[in-house]
Image: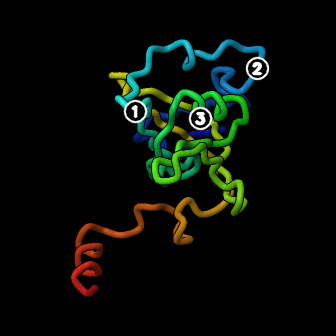
Amino acid sequence: MRCSASLLKFGCVLGNLPNPLGLFSASAPSKISRMNLAYDSQGLIPAIVQDAATGAVLMVAWMNAESLRLTQEKGEAVFWSRSRGELWHKGATSGNVMRVKLIRVDCDGDTLLLIVDPAGPACHTGERSCFYRSLAEFQAASEGD
């Protein structure tokens, strides 16, 4: 796979491997599970989700150790729902799963970046990204309520 211009500004991270770093193979050791990730006091770590094809940020969610393990096993994004207090396999109901191509960790080990191939819209509103409006648009809409 060649890097698109939008990915080049973020650094091309996908390469030509069908399974980068062996993250989804049960037989391959997982580099992430052995890392000392900095979970918060509730055992959660933020996960930024980015579209592999466009580089667009699709959403931000939370993961715990179990959701990270399941994501690595399934090759699809699984998060922790803070509002429901349960694991959440993104797209299990809607069909809008996110096939994870690569998981990156920031320099402090306290944030994950999931680079995904989304099967549909990321946002529950039906928008492609949860970041579909500017702050000004959000504030204007809030003032109208």
- The crowding category of the residue bearing disc 3, from other C-alpha atoms within 10 Å (few below 14, some 14 to 19, many at least 20), is many
SS of the residue under disc 1: loop
Left or right of 144 on screen, residue 75: right
* Closest to the observer, 140 or 53: 140
Q: Whole-percent x and y of residue 52?
A: 57, 45
Label 1 – label 2 distance at C-alpha? 27 Å
Report the residue at 26% width, 67% height from top. 135
The answer to whether the residue labelled 2 contacts the one labelled 3, judged by CB atoms less than 8 Å apart, is no
- The crowding category of the residue bearing disc 2, from other C-alpha atoms within 10 Å (few below 14, some 14 to 19, many at least 20), is few
Label 2 – label 3 distance at C-alpha? 16 Å
Among the 4 quarters of the image, the one containing residue 10 = top left
Left or right of 18 on screen, residue 32: left
Give the number of the mark in front: 2 or 3.
Answer: 3
Amino acid on which disc 3 is placed: Ser
Q: Does 127 sit above or below residue 61? A: below
The tag earlier along the polypeptide, 3 or 1, is 1
Amino acid on which disc 2 is placed: Ala
Report the residue at 38% width, 23% height from top. 38
SS of the residue under disc 2: loop
The tag earlier along the polypeptide, 2 or 3, is 2
**Circle 2 is placed at which residue position?**
26
Q: Confirm whether residue 17 shows in the render.
A: no
**Circle 3 is placed at which residue position?**
67
Q: Whole-percent x and y of residue 69?
A: 63, 27
Label 3 – label 1 distance at C-alpha? 14 Å
**Image quadrant for the N terminus?**
top right
Left or right of 81 on screen, residue 87: right
The tag earlier along the polypeptide, 1 or 2, is 2
